Amino acid sequence: MRRSPLAVVFVTVVIDLVGFGIVLPLLPFYAEELGASPTAVGLLVAVYSLTQFVFAPVWGRLSDRHGRRPFLLLGLFGSGLSYLVFAFAQNLAWLFASRILAGLMGANVAVAQAYIADSTEARDRARGMGLIGAAFGLGFILGPAIAGVTYHVWGYTAPGLAAAALCFGNAVAAWRALPESLSQERRARAERRWGPVDRLRAMAEAWRRPALRPVLALFFVGTMVFAVFTTTFPLLLERRLALDARHAAYFLAYAGLVMALVQGRCIGPLARRFGEPRLLVWGTGLLVLGYAAAPLVRSGLGVAVLILPIAVGTGVTNPSLASLASQVADPTEQGQVLGVSQSLSSLGRVVGPTWGGWVFDVGGQGAPYVLSAAWMVVALGLALRLSRRLRERAPVAPSPHDRSRAERVEA
């Protein structure tokens, strides 16, 4: 594994996602102050991901042709602009505009994943993808914590300015220190065309692959349900426990800490020992339990306990899915396939907040979580079927621990 470039892209993604983490817990409260209902809050969250859904495969495919570095830098500068608009929004229209721009520039997560795939061997791919997951986790730690502190300084303006400053500073640092990961030879082998029809064709082709189809379906379902949680969670704290944006920020920081520990320290050894398919099953099972328990929460301690299975389950499943997707893809189309997977994740973040906010409006505070648990039961069935199929096709190689034990027995 090429450690220095991976360290640079890790820091790049961390700081970019800190900006996202700053905005996330404040957005429902900010929108409500500007007159939004829970349904409108869901749409505000969804429009960010709708833009990502459209542009993630574009960034991924263009990076296959022109290199990863320029699109990572473009995303960082553009994200900084979006947070400036967020900081000074005076009505819902400007708030929507800030989230559309943020979604457009945040669509380069697929490029960061492709950068990791360029820089790792297949056996280390899960660990490399875990760096992106750990970056999300750290974004959830630092971003909400910064939001909770700066919110009291100057309302919603201070967190937006802090996010913008981080993105601009990170863009300058990455411009100076981030090398290109994709060789000229591999760029020349990539297809040149990438219009709207080509994007739809790429998604259809990826879906037709039997080995890739369940992975893509799990990307969609898992992300959709997690988006329901992050959208309605602040509203649940407000309506049921009378907590404000500061409390929501700190609880999300706690969730980010758990995800970062799982993805940054545990996912590599666990994947080498048990394999990604098994981790996928275990993580999905934890998510079923977590979402099913959410309607029972009646205290701050209950919220802290609830977050554990959701954060651990998410921390295990996301890098496992990304690793499986990248291993199925041809080396010349990893950016494209990972872009398709990110598009489906973005589609999940469109559908999830939209119906989650609406169900919260019309069905009550617990209804979104009951439905989320039902969706994760379906996902668990897909994960079990995928795990069984992969074990039949290619038995998992023995871990280093098992090999050393076998060698001692033979001796």
Image: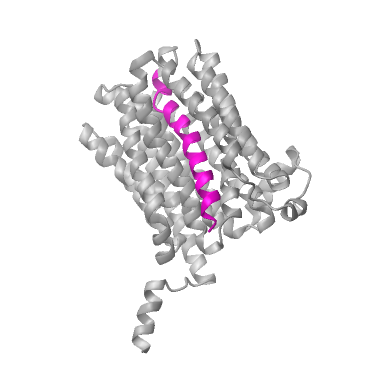
Residue 25 in the magenta stretch? The answer is yes
Q: Residue furthest top?
A: 90
Q: Is residue 197 above or below residue 401?
A: above
Q: Which residues are magenta?
A: 1-29
- For the C terminus, the quadrant is bottom left
Q: Residue at x 46, y 60 (%)?
A: 276
Report x, y in % for residue 373: 37, 43
Q: Residue at x 64, y 47 (%)?
A: 180
Residue 272 in view in this figure: yes
Q: As rendered, which of 9 and 299 lies closer to the eye? A: 9
Q: Is residue 12 above or below residue 35?
A: below
Q: Main secondary structure of the magenta part?
A: helix
Residue 350 in the magenta stretch? The answer is no
Report x, y in % for residue 57: 65, 42
The type of colouring in the image is one colour
- The part of the image, by quadrant, that contains residue 278 is bottom left
The total of numbered circles placed on residues is 0
Q: Is residue 331 left or right of residue 364?
A: right
Residue 364 in view in this figure: no
Report x, y in % for residue 64: 69, 47
Q: Residue at x 34, y 86 (%)?
A: 409
- The part of the image, by quadrant, that contains residue 61 is top right
Q: Residue furthest bottom?
A: 411
Q: Residue at x 40, y 66 (%)?
A: 273
